[in-house]
Image (cartoon, helix red, strand yellow):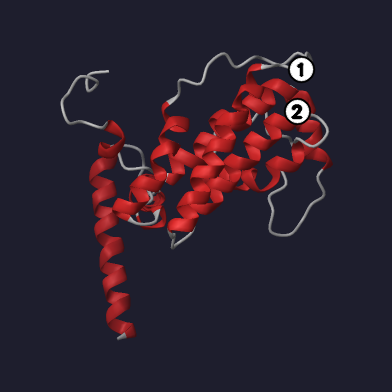
Amino acid sequence: PFWADLPYTDICKVICNDTLHGLHKAFKDHTAQWNINCVTPFEIDNQVRCLPKTPGFRHFSGGISKISQWSGQEAKDLEHIFLPLLAGVQTPSAIRATRAELDLIHHAGWKTLGEDDLKRMKDFNKIFHDNKNAFLQTPGRGGREQDHFNIPKPHARHHYPENIRWLGAPYNYPTEISEHYQIEVAKKAYKATNRKEYVKQMLLWLSRQEKIYLRGMLLRW
């Protein structure tokens, strides 16, 4: 990469860690997918369908292997139910690696973190890397093998404790807020147009929404 030979440059310090893409979606894209590849999509989907419906937890009634577009909330919902899916169908090492990553993600979501918490995050990351080679070994059920781990997001987890010491808990700087704002100012505004010269219409709609909001504040005051 272009920055490899730059003096006094540590790219992991330049790029702030982001829990939405660096943890939640990374888990879905990598660790969850590696497990699915090993166990096979058919088996994982059967495991998902067997889970009882529980209040507060999303039930993926159609399975998870065929979902192409995942929202951040869906990725989080997957984390809540994924570990039990591996019981009886995945190797102990792969389960340990998966659990360690889920524990790290859970800790990273806390609003306050101390040195003991950062040490536990390091321990979870070490457990993951000590057991990740299990994903290189397909149990012979038709799954697809993972052949390397040269992936930026799993590597970035090494730097979370240090990053948290500099900037505070990741809860304070997520990209979820700005991405949700995109729904309010872009998607809803576009839906209010007739799809012709929509930029002008979007600006007019947003201006009117702001005036309505300010008028409401005045009336409440």
Tell me the quarter of the picture where residue 160 sits. top left
Name which residue type carries label 2: Thr
Q: Residue at x 71, y 16 (%)?
A: 138
Q: Quick one: 121 or 90, which is closer to the camera?
A: 121
CB within 8 Å, label 1 to label 2: yes
Residue in front for this viewpoint, 26 or 122: 122
Viewer-nearest residue: 135 or 30: 135
Quadrant of the drawing holding the N terminus? top left
Does the rendering let one see residue 37?
A: yes
Up the image or down, 44 lies above or below 139; here it is below
Badge 1 local density, few (<14 within 10 Å), some, or many (20+)?
Answer: some
Circle 1: residue type: Pro
Mark 2 Cα-neighbour bin, 10 Å: few <14, some 14–19, many ≥20: some
Res. 156 image quadrant: top left
Mark 1 falls on what kind of element? loop
| Mark pair 1, 2: CA separation | 8 Å
Q: Which residue is disc 1 drawn over?
A: 139
| Residue designated by label 2 | 91
Looking at the image, which is closer to me, 60 or 30? Answer: 30
